[in-house]
Each structure stands twice: as C-alpha cells, then as structure tokens.
Image: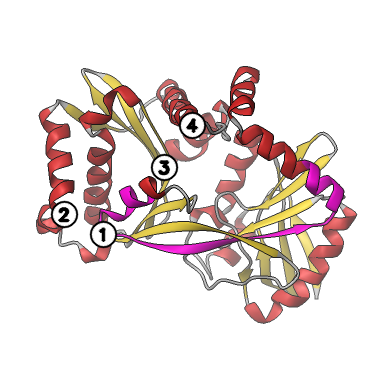
Amino acid sequence: MEMGVFESPGQGWDEFAARYTDLIFYQSIWSRVLEKGLGGQPLYFYLKEGDQLVAGLPGVLLKFGILRIFYSSIPYGGLVGEPSYFSAFLELLDREFRRRRIAQVRIVASPFSEPYTPSSYRSVSSKCTLLNLKRFDQERIWDSYRGDVRRAVRKAQKNGVSVKGTGTLQEAKAFYRLYHSSMERKGAPAKYPPPWFSAIYEVLIRQGRADILFALKEGEPIAGVVLVRSSTSYHYLHNGSEEAHFEDRPNDLIVDHIIREGVREGKEVLDFMGSDPADLSLIRFKEKWGSQSIDLDTSIKDISPLKSRIWEVAKKVAASKWGARALSWIR
C-alpha cells in the first residue's frame, strides 16, 4: 500500500470519490472554494493498493501563526473509500500529520455516509437536519405543510416579499452583510470572511453549482441563503437576515422556494446542515418543514496537546461577544 496527497486534486480524485459519494464537498471543485475563500492549502490524502485508489481523506490545512489545523473538510469530509482500509490508512495519516507539524485534526462525518469514528479520536456532536424531498408530491406541496408554515409563507407574500437568485459578484458580496448581522445578533463570530462568499460565487455560482437566494422587499435584500447543489441534494449552507424584517417571514418564503425547486429538479434531500444542539429555536425552524434531526459527530485528535489547547482557547475567545466584535473590527 502507498499513501500520497493531492495538493491540487483533479479528475483522478473526482473519479475515485464519485464511486462512493455524490456530495460536492468531496469533489475537487470544492477544494478551490476552500483555497480561495479561506486561504487554506487543500490536502486530499489517498491510499493506493496497486494502481487503485482505495481510501481518501479530503481536507484543508489552515495556518494561524504557529498553529496548523487540518479540517477534513468544511462542512463535511469524512473518510471515503473501502472501509476495510480505513484503519491502516489512519495509521499512515497519523505519521504524516506529525511530519507536517499539524497541531489538531478535525474530521466532520457526512450524514449521507456510514459513520466511521476512529478509536484514537474524541468526538463532539452536533445536530444535522435533513428533509426528505421525495415525500412531496409536486402538485400537493402546499397541502403537505403544517398550518403555521402555510401562514408564514402567506404572510411573506402578502407583505410583498419575493425571492431571487444571485446574478453578480457584487450581490454575492452583499450577502455578507446579512450573514454578519445574524452572527452579531447571536453574539457569535462571523467565522466565514467576505472572500469566502466571493469564492462561492466565482467557483460555484458561475457554474450553476450553487446560488445565493435573496428575499427582497421593495427591492432591498432582507434575508438570504447560500444554497449549494450536489447531484441528488441541496445544502442550506449559510443564512442571514435583518432582525427588523423578522415579521415579514422572509426565511420561510426562501425555504418554500427551495423545496419547490428541489422537488421540480428531482432532488432527494434538502440538507439543512449542522446546528448547535443548544440552539433549539433554529432546530425547530428546520424541523417544522417535516425534516428529521440526527446526531453528527466531529472526530478530533490533538497531535500537539499544547498547541491544540491554545487553539481551543482562541476559539472560545473569538466566540465571546468581545471576541466577535474584535474579529469584526479586524475584518
């Protein structure tokens, strides 16, 4: 067996990954979003048996001064390939992580694949919410909604709210204001910087692999959702909204639009992505459409305990109200 890494993954990696998953987050195109949007180094590790790739771990290396953190990947990126090879692959990976002086490794499982939790890693759970779009009849979507959902969508329509996609880079950049407003309202840091949304536009939206859907009132955006497309699923990657327009129910109108588009296109799942288990109001919003929430584990290994501790403390500081404001000021 031979282990290697693609720093610029391409067709060879895509053909391998496509045998096991259709998620866009495992494809080489996503590595360009990670690189352009976060300034990270794509590292797509693979294991070969003879001439065949048999296991892989896609991800990105982020550097913060002396700290090197490997995420596999963002938002999903667990091990892919033949499970019988995973144990041996992880042993080789551990040596490679140490050789590259990586302080911490974080592997977020995919809710679309059989989970594999390495025994030497600790786990942190979040909630991932999935809506089965196959349960909807295209002609009877409205009848499938709960009464409170129908009332919310009607209110948005009555208040003159409409939904449109993104047509320009400037519109994509404008989404950051809505995203930042939502994070600030929660007292949380805006973890994704403005270049992230520009990268999504330049790499994905121009190719029809994603969109930013805006809810407009009187021509002005009051809410938005970054929607990423895999071949059989939609991914509700980010959302943002203005508190002053909550009563116009723009988020409900956007979700209704996504469901109808997904059913029309024959998608199987609307993936509402992960949530903090303590954020019950957000989970309720996602579940009211008829979706189900499941546990999603992040497997974490501290290669360098001291540096990992520094990283965890830094994240807690950034997550505080003071830290969130400082991070916003720096950006």
- Can you tell which quarter of the image residue 105 is in? bottom right
- Mark 4 surroundings: few (<14), some (14-19) or many (≥20) residues within 10 A: some
Q: Nearer the viewer, residue 214 or 47?
A: 214
Residue bearing mark 3: 210
**Disc 4 residue type (three-letter):** Met
Report how far apart the C-alphas of labels 4 and 2 lie in the structure: 28 Å
Residue bearing mark 1: 290
At x 61%, y 46%, the residue is 31
At x 74%, y 40%, the residue is 313
> Residue 234: horizontal and vertical position, in percent?
37, 52
Circle nearer the viewer, 2 or 3: 2
Judge whether residue 128 can be spotted in this image: yes
- Mark 3 surroundings: few (<14), some (14-19) or many (≥20) residues within 10 A: many
> Residue 171: horizontal and vertical position, in percent?
40, 23
Looking at the rendering, the stretch of residues picked out in magenta corresponds to 283-310
**Disc 3 residue type (three-letter):** Ala
Residue bearing mark 4: 183
| Mark earlier in primary sequence (4, 2) | 2
Element carrying mark 2: loop
Report how far apart the C-alphas of labels 1 and 2 lie in the structure: 8 Å
Label of residue 70 in the image: none
Task: Identify whether 257 is placed above or below 232.
Answer: above
Tags 1 and 2 in contact by the CB under 8 Å rule?
yes
Report how far apart the C-alphas of labels 1 and 3 lie in the structure: 24 Å
> Residue 320: horizontal and vertical position, in percent?
61, 32
Q: Quadrant of the C terminus?
A: top right
Task: Identify whether 30 is placed above or below 321.
Answer: below
Element carrying mark 1: loop
- Can you tell which quarter of the image residue 300 is in? bottom right
| Mark earlier in primary sequence (4, 1) | 4
